[in-house]
Amino acid sequence: MRFSSALLKWYRKHGRAMPWRDHPDPYAVWVSEIMLQQTRVETVVPYFEKWMKLFPDIKTLAEASEQDVLNAWEGLGYYSRARNLYKAAKIIASKFNGQLPRDLTALRSLPGIGRYTLGAIASIAFKMDAPTLDGNLRRVFSRLYDVTEYADSPAGEKLLWKYAAQNLPKGKAGDYNQALMDLGATICLPRNPKCPLCPLLVFCKAHENGTQELRPALKPRKQAPHYIHTAGVIIEHGRVLLSQRPVDGLLGGMWEFPNGRVVPKAGDKGDPAKELVKVLNAAYRIKVRKNEALGIVQHAYTHFKVTVHAFRCTSVSIPKIRNLKWVKISGLDDYPMGKVDRQIARKIR
């Protein structure tokens, strides 16, 4: 039995049930593939279902406000994905009559659609013979061919794309790509792969060589830096002051409590409580009196870790700056926030 035949036979019996597979229209496939980037299926499913109720088609998404889009995405992380979906929906609504273009060049030109997403949409939604390569597929092919190149290097990437394309069964690329995704998520796991249950065991060179736990080979990671921030929760008459982050960059367009990084001096770890007044004045020209500690929140982002010390404050003077806004405490849920600030918000209810 050929490699692809064995895989598809397994998929027909063991493929996972997912809401976007019941009716794989291009919009649903696009949304699901963007959500699934660096995010587990069980996390994505409730977000996908909520999203499709709020924004059932591209026209509805394009006409929504960016704040509504970010609110719907809150908690899923990697918010540039939501902003790119929103930007792309506006382009599709204006240039492609509200329909995801079948032309691959046009599709690739849309914000947030790279080579992997392009292949997934083309094969699953449009039934084209297109390969794709997500994290699960990288791991599966790295083991099947016992690839010694770093999977996250240009050479390794090129080799894995070659393997993804050369095994593609004509007319069945969508099922084939999804079968590989499911295999990587349920059998060919990052640690302790379930090799005896794998339908591709007889084809797997890494298993034959006993190197499956060493694949994929990845570049050594540097230790993530750890930053200390101090944040002011400034409350007046049932309202709290929020700051909106710049549109570009981490958590773009989201709302947060005014804060800044504590930069320790030589031989000193830095004191967030002592630094608060100075940090807020330097970053926002806000002058406050610190009242009490609200708590400490920690979070790990992709490339760094942060510990935020939050303090309840009384304002002395607040400048009229566009990105600062007084918000009713009862209405905080209407403002999209990252996980750190949402946890701080819960401390003042």
Image (cartoon, helix red, strand yellow):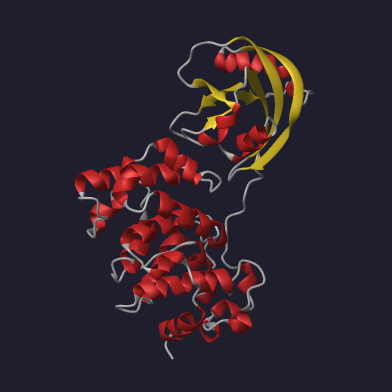
Q: Residue 283: horizontal and vertical position, in percent?
A: 57, 18
Residue at 34% in and 59% down: 118
Say which quarter of the image contains residue 148.
Answer: bottom right
- Reply above or below: 41 against 80: below
Looking at the image, which residue sits at the far top?
317
Residue at 42% in and 53% down: 53
Residue at 35% in and 68% down: 124
Q: Residue 311: horizontal and vertical position, in percent?
A: 71, 24
- Reply above or below: 309 against 276: below
Depth check: 11 or 68 in front? 68
The N terminus: image quadrant:
bottom left
Residue at 53% in and 48% down: 76
- Reply above or below: 313 against 257: above
Q: Residue 99: horizontal and vertical position, in percent?
A: 25, 54
Depth check: 113 or 286 in front? 286
Depth check: 6 or 57 in front? 57
Looking at the image, which residue sits at the far right?
267
Depth check: 52 or 107 in front? 52
Q: Residue 179: horizontal and vertical position, in percent?
A: 46, 74
